[in-house]
Amino acid sequence: MSTPRAHDADEGDEGDEKGVDDAVRTLLLLMPRMVGRVKKIPVPEALQSFSLAPRHLSLLSYLLFDGPTTVNELAARLQVAPTTVSLLVGDLSRQGILERREDEADRRRRIICIAADQQPAITSWLAPGAAAWRKALAPLTPDQRQIFVDTLLAYEAAVSGEEPG
């Protein structure tokens, strides 16, 4: 996977390139294994009859970890249009996974939350992944955790052809 280098490159650059190539090689082998293992996390029986996709998982994760919120706040966190979130929420509401209720402070707004009877199943589904991330990230300093997250975001942007940030 090495690329040809100019003849005037100093040895420090060559050593760094080899280090990057070694890390890339390791990650190219690791990523499919990670994805495969995550996919093997069983969907709880209570949720198996629903057609849940990765886009639902992200939305449910935000609601589980951050609590009830509005469609616009979810859209901002998911970095998608509010209409997209509204469609997802509508679908999950019809299935009884989410509930919409009036915001007591502003009755024009709707607050989205996980339905109480679905909360245990969703928690058990997302808990193994959350526990694994906590275990992996706990030994890192806050700066190291941020570098790790920023690196994953930059990788996602590069794979999708987008500019990071």
Image (cartoon, helix red, strand yellow):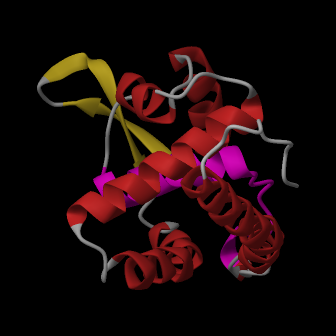
| Magenta segment main secondary structure | helix
Q: Residue 142: which quarter of the image?
A: bottom left
Q: Is residue 3 left or right of residue 156?
A: right
Look at 53% across and 43% down and name the residue there. 153
Near-viewer residue (27 or 127): 27
Query: Which image quadrant is residue 144 in?
Result: bottom left
* Residue 49 is one of the magenta-drawn residues: yes
Q: Is residue 69 visible?
A: yes
Where 24 falls versus 112 (above or below)? below
Q: At x 41% / y 26%, what residue is drawn?
A: 76
Task: Out of 42 and 29, give the one closest to the viewer.
Answer: 29
Location of residue 69 with respect to 60 vertically, above or below: above
Q: Which residue corresponds to the image point at 75% horizontal and 74% vertical from the top-left?
A: 30
Foreground residue, 96 or 65?
A: 65
- Disc count in the image? 0
Magenta segment, which residues?
46-67
Establish if 14 lies above or below 126: above
